[in-house]
Image (tube, rainbow, N blue to C red):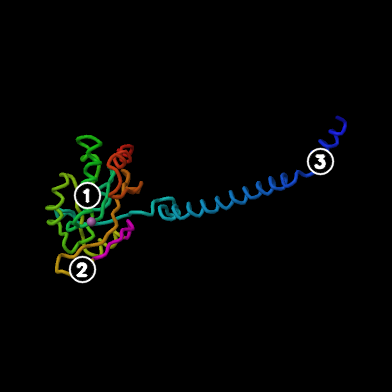
Amino acid sequence: MKSLTPLVTANRLAPVPGGGHVAAMSRAAKIALAAWIAVLVGFAGWIVVDFSRTDSGAPAIGGPFSLTDQNGKRVTDADFKGKPTLIYFGFTYCPDVCPTSLLLMQTAVEQLGKDADQKVNRVFITVDPERDTPAALKDYLGNFGATMVGLTGTPQEIAAVAKAYRVYYKKVESKDGAPYLVDHSSIFYLLDRRGRFVRHFTHQSKAEDIAAAIKPLL
Ligand code: NI
């Protein structure tokens, strides 16, 4: 029994083979890893912040615009203030994505109640001003509820508003003589009652999710 004491003492005093050192290394490694993760997260955060916010904290997406609606009336971003707004960029000749998106917009707003289309602005801005005249927009948007606003303008005006919303669009000629198409980003922009960008959705988003995001803004 007497011989056990020195053994225990020796074990306590002597470095545990590997053990303590490994533990210390592990702690150091964890600290290094945590620091690295913080750098990565910070970097990712910086990208996100840089994408969505300006230095003043105001949204970097969106901004003032002056365009022509489907009735030929000039409207600006200020005309949409007072209600939350969903904006979508597309073109009336679009064979699939735009109609899907406009239906999704309509479905999402309908989920907020039967008179919700009076409380939420739904705005379709064309990326094809050449063909999407006010009359063409009026004809097309009649399929998506009475309160949908269609906006067009000069190519310069459309380019400016697309740039403000970071919308990509590019005319693509058809080879077989069919009407040209326009490649474009398919994004819904949700703005609050003061016209500030809140968040975005795509045509693959769920109507319920869009409705849920609009609800607190009403
Ligand atoms: Ni489209």
Q: Secondary structure at mark 1?
A: helix
> Disc 2 on helix, strand or loop?
loop
Q: Position of residue 161 (x, y in %)?
A: 29, 58
Image quadrant where one finds the C terminus: top left
Q: Residue at x 80, y 39 (%)?
A: 11
Q: Which residue is rendered at x = 16% and y = 50% of the image?
A: 141
Q: Would you say the residues marked 1 and 2 are in contact, meaning their CB atoms lie under 8 Å apart?
A: no
Pointer 1 residue: 100
Label 3 CB sits under 8 Å from any ligand 1 atom: no
Q: Is residue 198 left or right of residue 47?
A: left
Cα separation between marks 1 and 2: 23 Å
Between the residue at mark 3 and the residue at mark 2, the CA separation in whole angstroms equals 81 Å
> Is residue 131 positioned above or below 62 on the image?
below
Q: Quadrant of residue 120?
A: top left
Counting from the top left corner in percent of width and height, residue 77 is at 27, 51
In the displayed structure, 7 sits above or below 172; it is: above
Q: Which residues are magenta?
A: 163-171
Marks 1 and 3 close (CB-CB < 8 Å): no
Q: Amino acid at mark 1?
A: Thr
Residue under label 2, please give it: 173
* Residue at 23%, 66% in the rendered image: 172
Dot 3: few (<14), some (14–19), or many (≥20) neighbours within 10 Å?
Answer: few
The residue singled out by tag 3 in the image is: 13
Name of the residue lying farthest toward the top = 1
The residue closer to the viewer here, 111 or 15, is 15
Viewed as shown, does residue 29 lie left or right of 142?
Answer: right
Q: Nearer the viewer, residue 108 or 131?
A: 108
User: In the depicted view, which residue is nearer to us: 100 or 213?
Assistant: 100
